Image (cartoon, grey):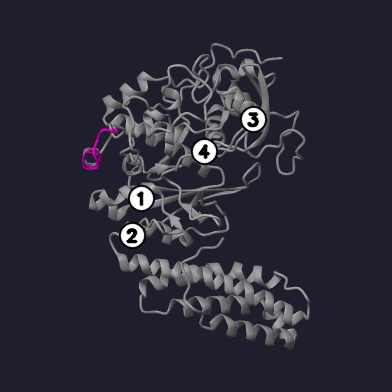
Amino acid sequence: MPQLPPPATATFSAADDPWIDTRTGPRYSQRGLRDLFLNAHIIDDLALPHPPVASALLRIATAITARITGLDDPELTASQWNALRRTCLKQGRFTPDAIHAYFDQHAWDVFDLVRPWLQEPALRTQCDHSSGINAFVPGRPAGNNLAWFSPHGHHTAEPVPTAEALQNLLIHHYYGRSGQCTPRTVDGVTTGRQYSGPLRSTVSFHPLGRTLHETLLAGVPAFTGDEQLPGTDACPWEETTPSPQNPSTPVTWPGRLLTGQSQHAILLVPGPGGSTVTDAYLTWATKDPEEAKEPKEPEISTDPYLSYRFITERKSVARRRTKNRADASRAWWRELDTLVLAPDEHGTYARPAVFDTLNDLPEDLRRSLRIRVHGFDQDGKVIDRQWYTAITPPLLNWTQEHDPAKAQRIAECCREAEQTAQRLATVAKQAWKTATHSGTSKTTWANKALARYWPKAETVFWRLLDEPETDAPAAFAAAAASALREVTEAARIRHNSAAHAVAHAIKGLHRRRRPSAPRKTA
């Protein structure tokens, strides 16, 4: 039976009720979206516990920033746009009247019967049953899954605070799973298949200023399209009436680009008063019935905070663009060459598009600007492995536009670190095969050696940036040799064959190899 409508007394405002964790000095507090903008100039940073939530919220907040500052005007020339952003930065805070005017204009009630924030109220009648709160909360077992690490189960569906539920809502919209979901009927067509969120299994790079005010203004992406009519772009909460997303709808800037590409339709069921969420509907977000009959993977526009890899098609000269996948085992500094090198139409990698506007920031901000890294290591369908975050040192002065020599040194060191890792894996496998007289080259030594190598390689990397005359291949080879010796110490003491095999492997690590084109590996 369809779920009964929520009680009319349930209310929670995404604009005015606290749900966003922030940090100001040593103090932590929760704020609503309106308060977030009113006090952005005194807030140091977001303090959300889950990196995918922070990455999603930064995109939403950036779209709102463009609205309240006028940076969303596609008629502005590049010089006018940069001048307006500099003026906003010089003011030191967002204009309170503009903030109130924007938030008073739109609907923010999470449990509104007609326009619930970032939800589709039609799911009450389009779905025969809800999905359950456990399916909505990441980490809880749902359906037939075993409860290995959670006290929750089918009969222990505990409600969640609405503030936490809103954060989970963002995870589903941006990083949600694909595959089977709660069936939904639209125009007589019923299907239960959904596609993954636009950011699934990706790592995002966000500019990080000294205050949240600087962070949001530095993170606004510039308009790069050919044409966009003023007033045609809308965020989901700005639409007059809520409707399912249609993949054929053009991705406009900045509202739909940053907030309107979700492949998931969601509706929360509140507890008494709206302080908790007791249930949820979670299903697909395609409007066209023909699309529901024969689903077609939607095209996702280039996200300004993601880096991309280009793959040349074998049968043509065309190149296919793919998102760089998040990898929790991969340290952020291994992507540094992608971030500092200027765009190259013949290059293999492209840095996030937002970097193309950072050189136009005032010098004091540019010199202090760091990069916040938010990654969510997932497979392409349903498995969530690990999320992670990191903050880089100020690095814009290392970009190719400002310091070509430093940028090339970074690229060289990243390349040598990766190539040495490849070589270490190869010689370690061969050494195992030789030492054990086995017909197969197992990865026992290789995996352990690589685990020891990468922390050493990071230390070498930062040292090499301060020592431009030091030979990078030799430095990384020494780190790899040290790692291999450490993991094979016991075997070398017990068996002469292991000692000889490892000695031969170390010679291979130090052997000079021919220069090769830049290349990255996982």
As drawn, 420 above or below 163: below
Residue that label 4 marks: 299
Residue that label 3 marks: 294
Going from N to C along the chain, the mark reached first, 3 or 4, is 3
The residue sitting at the front extreme is: 315
- Amino acid on which the number 1 mark rests in the picture: Phe
CB atoms of marks 2 and 1 within 8 Å: yes
Q: Is residue 462 left or right of residue 6?
A: left
As drawn, 273 above or below 498: above
The residue sitting at the top extreme is: 8
Q: Is residue 258 left or right of residue 289?
A: left
Mark 4–mark 1 distance (CA, rounded to whole Å): 23 Å
Determine crowd level at label 3: few under 14, some 14-19, many 20+ residues with C-alpha closer than 10 A.
Answer: few
Q: How far across and down, in percent of the image, does residue 519 sit? A: 49, 65
Image quarter in which the N terminus is found: top right
Q: How far across and down, in percent of the image, does residue 295 sit? A: 62, 32
Residue that label 2 marks: 399
Image quarter in which the C terminus is found: bottom right
The secondary structure type at the circle numbered 2 is loop
- Amino acid on which the number 4 mark rests in the picture: Glu
Going from N to C along the chain, the mark reached first, 3 or 1, is 3
> Magenta segment: does it hold 35?
no
